[in-house]
């Protein structure tokens, strides 16, 4: 499942072609994604200018010239392909948006999603704070307001385990299963540990590890685990850089103990039972 670094990578790739480009054509091959795509999406988007996209949590947001936002969510298995040549549709391509850049180059942005847990929406920019997918999102982990003080408020009197806490989009936006495992390994904290047992030093380590891991993965273009492709069609290469996720029975790179895998809320959770305490 694409997490913050993958979505950021897609956003960066899109920003190279959508910046002041005009939408020339839209084709919807399936409207029944996680929710149905709105009936008026084609009509409202055609001939509009797309501006520079940005990311909020795991959502890609592309502002348009008529004060709207095109929202793209990759869900569990969604990918974006950016094609500059003639393209034959492949299985699970659900949406194709043809755009013309300000220097008259033509691209197709294709949304492919085998499991259809993703979504595409178009709404007025004035409603961004109240959009049902965006309004409850927590802090952006790469922003300056992701602080010990913020986490202290959120863990107050809570007994949930730290891994579920990190993956709660209402607390921190953009972290999923893979990066939660990586962050806790780097911060040397056991994923099962209850958040109300964490002191200030633990929270500092979590923040430091989160920023380090996310920035590092954005730099290498995001992980390609599972179905996520980079927008240019190449697989990402962060997969070799993971330290603990998917490494069951391999040696921990820090203490050489064997990595364990357990289930937490039905998600495979990899950790080192020796150095993560
Ligand atoms: Zn270890």
Image (cartoon, rainbow, N blue to C red):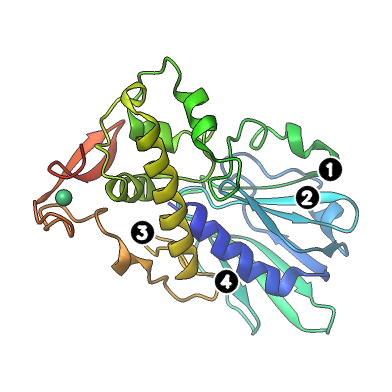
Q: Name the residue under label 2.
A: 69
Residue holding disc 3: 226
Disc 1 and disc 2: Cα gap in Å? Answer: 6 Å
What is the CA distance from the residue labelled 1 to the residue labelled 3? 33 Å
Position of residue 96 relative to residue 135, above or below, is: below
CA gap between label 1 and label 4 equals 30 Å
Up the image or down, 206 lies above or below 254; here it is above
C-alpha distance separating marks 2 and 4: 26 Å
Residue carrying label 4: 89
Quadrant showing the C terminus? top left
User: Considering depth in this image, is 265 or 184 the residue closer to the camera?
Assistant: 184
| Contact? badges 1 and 2 (CB < 8 Å) | yes
Which of marks 2 and 1 precedes in the sequence? 2
Q: Residues within 10 Å of mark 2 (few under 14, many from 20)?
A: many
Name which quarter of the figure residue 241 lies in: bottom left
User: Which mark is first along the chain, 4 or 3?
Assistant: 4
The residue carrying mark 1 is 124
Q: Nearer the viewer, residue 65 or 241?
A: 241
x, y percent for residue 233: 50, 75
């Amino acid at each position: 499942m694409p997490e913050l670094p993958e979505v950021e990578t897609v956003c960066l790739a899109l920003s190279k072609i959508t910046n002041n480009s005009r939408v020339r054509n839209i084709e919807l091959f399936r409207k029944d994604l996680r929710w149905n795509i709105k009936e008026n999406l084609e009509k409202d988007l055609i001939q509009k200018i797309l501006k520079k996209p940005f990311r909020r949590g795991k959502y890609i947001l592309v502002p348009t010239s008529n004060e709207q936002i095109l929202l793209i969510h990759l869900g569990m298995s969604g990918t974006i392909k950016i094609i500059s040549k003639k393209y034959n549709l492949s299985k699970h391509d659900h949406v194709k948006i043809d755009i013309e850049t300000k220097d008259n180059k033509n691209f197709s942005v294709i949304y492919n999603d085998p499991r259809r847990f993703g979504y595409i929406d178009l709404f007025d920019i004035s409603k961004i704070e109240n959009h049902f997918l965006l309004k409850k999102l927590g802090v952006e982990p790469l922003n300056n307001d992701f602080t010990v003080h913020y986490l202290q408020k959120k863990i107050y009197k809570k007994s949930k385990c730290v891994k579920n806490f990190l993956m709660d989009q209402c607390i921190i936006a953009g972290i999923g299963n893979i990066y939660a495992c990586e962050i806790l390994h780097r911060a040397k904290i056991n994923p099962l540990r209850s958040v109300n047992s964490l002191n200030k030093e633990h929270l500092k380590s979590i923040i430091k590890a989160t920023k380090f891991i996310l920035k590092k993965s954005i730099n290498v273009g995001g992980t390609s685990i599972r179905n996520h492709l980079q927008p240019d069609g190449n697989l990402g290469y962060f997969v070799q850089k993971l330290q603990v996720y998917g490494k069951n029975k391999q040696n921990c790179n820090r203490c050489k103990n064997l990595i364990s895998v357990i289930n937490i809320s039905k998600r495979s959770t990899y950790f080192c039972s020796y150095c993560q305490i």
